[in-house]
Image (cartoon, helix red, strand yellow):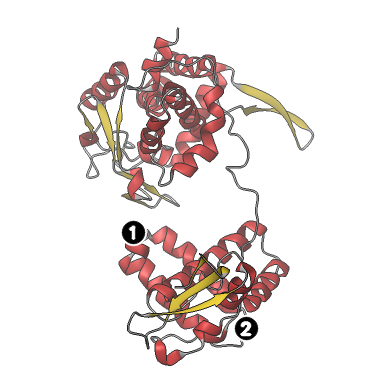
Amino acid sequence: MADISKRENAKGVKYQVRYLDKSKASGYSYKSFSTRKAAKAFVESGEINKSPSKFNTSVTTISQATDLWLNICEKEGRDGKDPVTPYTLSEYTRRAKVINSYHWHQPIQELKASHIVEFRSWLLKSGVSRYRAGVTMTALFGIFQELCIRDIIAANIVTNITVRTDSRYDQPVSVPSQDDVFALLSAADRLAESSNKRIANSWARYRPMLYLAADSGMRPQEYVAVAKAAFVDGGVHVTRAIERPGTRISVTKTKAGRRFIDLSPEVYEMVQNYIRRHSIDNRHDLVFPTSTGHWQCVDHWRKRGFNVACLEAGLVKLVEVDGETVPKNKFTPYSLRHYYASLLLKSYENNPANLKRAQYLMGHSKIETTLNLYTHLMDFDDVAASGRGGSLTRMKESQ
């Protein structure tokens, strides 16, 4: 791979490009330029990739490169990570298909940054959404990065050539208030005590699910798949999730998703009581299985559980749909995760070092995700300042 470094000496400032060169004993060659712009232009020109004798020449076409990348994703895992899930692999395959549908005139070793820009222009004019164009460019970057790592090319010419899209992290998330969360939990209590046996039976299961979601900040696909054995020592080990589109249980999407979360004592006991009295034996050791022992569909949980609780709690708003005024929920199951984050960050705001623990408990691979998505929640006023325990513990301490 190529990098640019600034060098200063008595003669002035120079910008040095270091790039792979298998003909050198050190494995690298160097070239200096008077400006960073010139050094960058040299890297993007593709000139340093044009000496195939110096590199592995087993891959020369984009088609071969996408095949290599997909195989690495499936069998080895990229950059030391776990192999991707089947769902993610199918998504990557879709992106590779788009990349291969473009007519690449040059071998990989002769491509320049300008050729990548031409591909981006073609992509944006092809009718795909900006989001789809953006993730396709990200895939192309990943492909070229693998080629660099494996000494097939010396520089990743896709670097800095992206499609700007509106990120979900750019807009502050909508967070329920403490009163909203109490209203939801109270609604779950009432539904579980309903005189209607069918409703009461359903909410014998949905109530501890809702409490667990609010108390732990787990993702819906995580608590739907949670195992009985995961509840130990007053908390829950998060190790698996329902893989989209809901056809199998898998490990969490990233290693960071595997974490231990402290629970409030009453929620921990509520789940344990449900396991003892209601949860049926099933081959996946699920806490909240269906009557057939299968995992619940996340969408069914949202419609039959969470949405019903919102309606019972009055957490709806009236909207116009096709000329009719209909009720729409103010929140989604993910809103409880956002509320958990708000309590967590408020409890840590006087000790920035604890942001790393917030990252851990949220299951984020990068601290930037935690900061970009949730930092504005540090201004939440009605939360407690405890550093441990679940959301319910913090909520009660704030009263």
Q: Position of residue 192 (x, y in %)?
A: 40, 17
Q: Secondary structure at mark 1?
A: loop
Choose the circle earlier in sequence order: 2 or 1.
Answer: 1
382 with respect to 393 (left or right): right
395 with respect to 178 (left or right): left
What whole-number distance in Å separates the C-alpha atoms at marks 2 and 1? 31 Å
The front one of 132 and 327 is: 132
Q: Position of residue 148 (x, y in %)?
A: 43, 74
Which residue carries the number 1 mark?
A: 81
- Mark 2 residue crowding within 10 angstroms, few (<14) / some (14–19) / many (20+): few
The front one of 167 and 366 is: 366
- For the residue marked with disc 2, what is the amino acid? His
- For the residue marked with disc 1, what is the amino acid? Lys
Which residue carries the number 2 mark?
A: 103
Q: Residue at x 42, y 49 (%)?
A: 246
Q: Secondary structure at mark 2?
A: loop
List the single residue furthest toward the top: 399
Quadrant showing the N terminus: bottom left
315 with respect to 354 (left or right): right
Q: Position of residue 110 (x, y in %)?
A: 56, 86
